Image: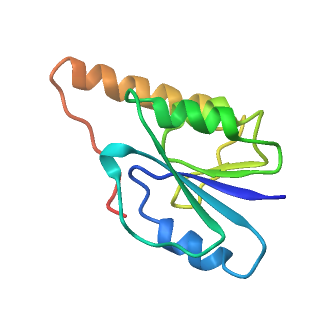
Amino acid sequence: MTTVLIDGDACPVVDSVIELTTGTGIFVTILRSFSHYSNKIYPEHVNTLYIDGGPDAVDYKIVQLVTKDDIVITQDYGLASLLLSKAKIVMHHKGHIYNDSNIDMLLQQRYNNAQIRKQGGRHKGPPPF
């Protein structure tokens, strides 16, 4: 059974994914830290898990839960790299599919930008959603 796992702390497409999966038999699991708690009521096919712990606790829980039939939505390149061999599809919320051909370049870009910031510099960020 396919489940869409959403790295939900900063994902702007949660409502769109829920709308698209309604009536399809596809379940959605939103994983969030308690610091992003919401009282929002979702349809029956949606499950929200709140994770307590450190800054990467949600990521570790996603790695623990994912199966070969799942689709994962995340904007975290590090998490995406861990999931490539475990999930059916790993994608960015803008629709880009992470794969073995592009993940190394994305991780290198993330590293380079971190080095620039560490030295007090600035780099061009992503365009607005």
Residue drawn at (53%, 35%), measured in percent from left and top?
A: 59
128 w.r.t. 85: above or below: below
Residue drawn at (26%, 37%), measured in percent from left and top?
A: 123
Q: Nearer the viewer, residue 11 or 95?
A: 11
The quadrant the N terminus occupies is bottom right
Q: Find residue 91 and report its horizontal and vertical position in percent.
A: 62, 51
Q: Find residue 113 and report its horizontal and vertical position in percent.
A: 34, 29
Q: Find residue 37 and report its horizontal and vertical position in percent.
A: 35, 54
Q: Nearer the viewer, residue 86 or 101?
A: 86
Q: Nearer the viewer, residue 14 or 57?
A: 57
Quarter of image, res 21: bottom right
Quarter of image, res 128: bottom left
The quadrant the C terminus occupies is bottom left
Residue drawn at (45%, 31%), measured in percent from left and top?
A: 109
> In the picture provided, is 12 more to the left or to the right than 97?
left
Residue drawn at (19%, 17%), measured in percent from left and top?
A: 119
